[in-house]
Amino acid sequence: MKKKILIAVTALFICAALITGGIFGGLTAARNNRLKISNELTGLTGEYKNVILLIGDGMGKNHMKAGEAVYGKDFEMRTRAVIAGEAMTFSQSLTGPTDSAASATALSTGVKVNNGEVARHKGENIKSNMELAIENGMSTGVIAAEGVKGATPAGFSAHADDRNDLDDILGTQLISNIDLFMGGAKEYYDEHAEKIQNAGYTYFSDMNDFDNSAEKLWGVFDELPTDSAESSSTAPTLAQISVAAIEYLDEKSGDNGFFLMIEESYIDKMSHSNDMEGMLAHMLAYNETVNAVLDIAEEIGDTLVIATADHETGGLQYNGELAADLNNKMFTKTHHTKANVPYFIYSKIDGVPETLNNTQIAYICRYYITNRQAA
């Protein structure tokens, strides 16, 4: 009897192992097939001196639709686009959707990595487009509403095995030679102000102290308001600091051009919390930022502008509801999803398919970083 039971248990373990192996084998095969997608876009055309990439962290298609219901019309983010489509966001991790570190790394380097890795894979740094821009003599900047220690801005400006390695992130940012960092998290950065200044940055928390002649700038604020009516020199909006940064980088770069990444961080945060009102406020602030960036980009000329998201957060459902009917229950999850996200290109280029891998957005930026026209 005992022998029969032992044989039965052994058989169950073998079956479980085979099933588990089959499942993971299938997942591995599917992942490897996705990773074989080429980044190359052979039909890209045109030359632009400057490149600006905006990222709405956590923004999916339904976040935009809900925001437009409140806005009362289509976002300028949508209506001013020359090219529009969707981007796939999967990471190299075997299961689950991407996190912000892996998606930012994909958008910054053109390489898929595991969730949590910041422009680094298996201990090896991956060259970012920010580093490539510096090598090509361009001025560079990184802006994030939540602060540049977050996973998304870190993916463009730092290298770390884990997104929570804040010492590694700050340390590599300080030796990055990036010209401008701006955003929130003043309390955190005040503790490191001396270190930042010793790295050659003019450190400030009041826009009245924004020095256009400074060699390098590091601006920090307690919080960026979503409403420009509530802004001040010590609490500017994301749109306001973005315009100031563009003017600074444009003047500093001369004929060499600049590369700037701007992140609206809180669409994601509010979606994790299923906070519809908070998400909508930041969704509108992101549209306002894109609109302001497009205005200044048209003014200075020779500038490629792209807006997208790193992933969708919250599994938001929207079926044409009116603004008054939007509510927290329209979120179906509290985490990221695998949904494709919107992308918009505001300059005339050819050879871009309607559905992209997010690494191909990095490739587009990289192409124009290395194929620039002088002013």
Image: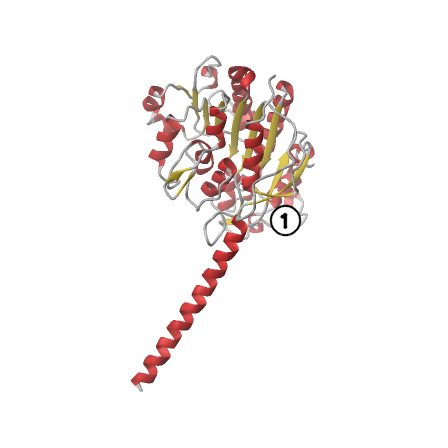
**Going 37% across and 26% down the picture, which residue do you hit?**
174
| Colour scheme in use | secondary structure
Mark 1: give few (<14), some (14-19) or many (20+) Cα within 10 Å. Answer: some
- Residue 258 versus residue 286: which sits nearer the camera? 258
In the figure, residue 364 lies in which quadrant? top right
Quarter of the figure that contains the C terminus: top right
Residue at the far left in the pictured view = 2
Quarter of the figure that contains the N terminus: bottom left
Residue at mark 1: 318
What x and y, as percent, mark residue 309? 56, 39
Q: Is residue 34 above or below residue 187?
A: below
Does residue 116 show up? yes
Left or right position of 70 against 312: right
SS at mark 1 in the image: loop
- Residue 22 versus residue 99: which sits nearer the camera? 22
**Going 47% across and 25% down the picture, which residue do you hit?**
135
What x and y, as percent, mark residue 342? 61, 41
Does residue 265 show up? no
What x and y, as percent, mark residue 189? 37, 28
- Residue 4 versus residue 55: which sits nearer the camera? 4
Numbered label tally: 1
Amino acid, disc 1: Tyr
